Amino acid sequence: MWYLLFVIGLAASTAGLDRKETRMKYIATNQELYLEKLEKELHELEDEFEHLSEDVDDLSIKHLKARVHNLEEEHEHGCKKDEVSCGGDVPQCISKLFFCDGHVDCKNGNDEHDDHCSEAPAHVGSSYTGIATWKSCEALRPHHAVVTITASLRREFFSAAVYVRGILSFEEETKQHAVRTYPLRGFYNFGQRQLLLGPDRGTTPIYAVKCDFNLDDDDNADCYIVNPASREVCAHFQATRY
């Protein structure tokens, strides 16, 4: 009798252990499957993220650093309206007309440095193009705008600037896709690295253009289409030189 009860009890205990072990295996299996599912979803998210954006190129990093440098220099040196910072660790401002005039005026010599005195932005045939976004003057959708240098002259007695002629052109929003053109004339200033073009003589003064070469090279600039009378900014485009 006691032997029979012992056998029954042992069987029941073994059955209980089997059920517990089976339950633990079931839980462990579910957890493994859940972890595998999470790992798969994580890899899918990584793949999606890689396709969302490309790696930042060196040129974009260079332009970003130039913008930060411009902001820091403007804040730290605080040059007057017609002055330009010499750059470097020692603050110094000189007249924009003293840059690239053949005489060293900055203590660090930056006013006569080849990079600062490059005439490339004013080369004949250079075209600056980008997508113009209008904020006033006209209700136009974003479109390609092009500024083309058609003539340039650097006078020996006033070498701080290059006199230029150019044409602003952009497409009208019509069925014929007509192109508007505006003859311009002005100069490129070495000190401020700025191209300023106003309406040519004998033309209706509708638009002017200002391009700031503030991205540490001669091939990219922040350009603005401006009302020459009020100097109101009508449109902006990030220009690339071709």
Image: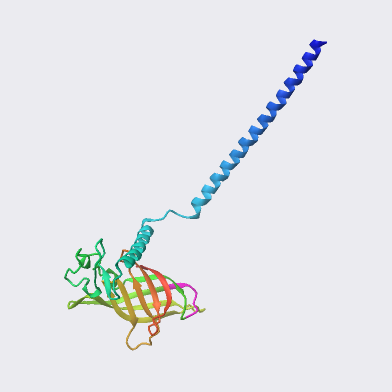
Q: Is residue 60 left or right of residue 12?
A: left
Question: Which residue occupies the extreme right position in the image?
Answer: 1
Give 17 or 117, whichever is nearer the viewer. 17
Q: Is residue 30 left or right of residue 191?
A: right
How are the colours assigned in the image? rainbow
Q: Quadrant of residue 15?
A: top right
Residue 238, given in percent of the width and then of the height, sits at 40, 68
Residue 39, given in percent of the width and then of the height, sits at 56, 41
Residue 228 colored magenta?
Answer: no
Residue 30, given in percent of the width and then of the height, sits at 65, 36
Give 168 or 80, whichever is nearer the viewer. 80
Relative to 207, does residue 2 appear above or below in the rendering?
A: above
Segment tinted magenta in the rendering:
138-144
Image label count: 0
Give 58 or 242, whichever is nearer the viewer. 58
Question: Which residue occupies the extreme bottom position in the image?
Answer: 202
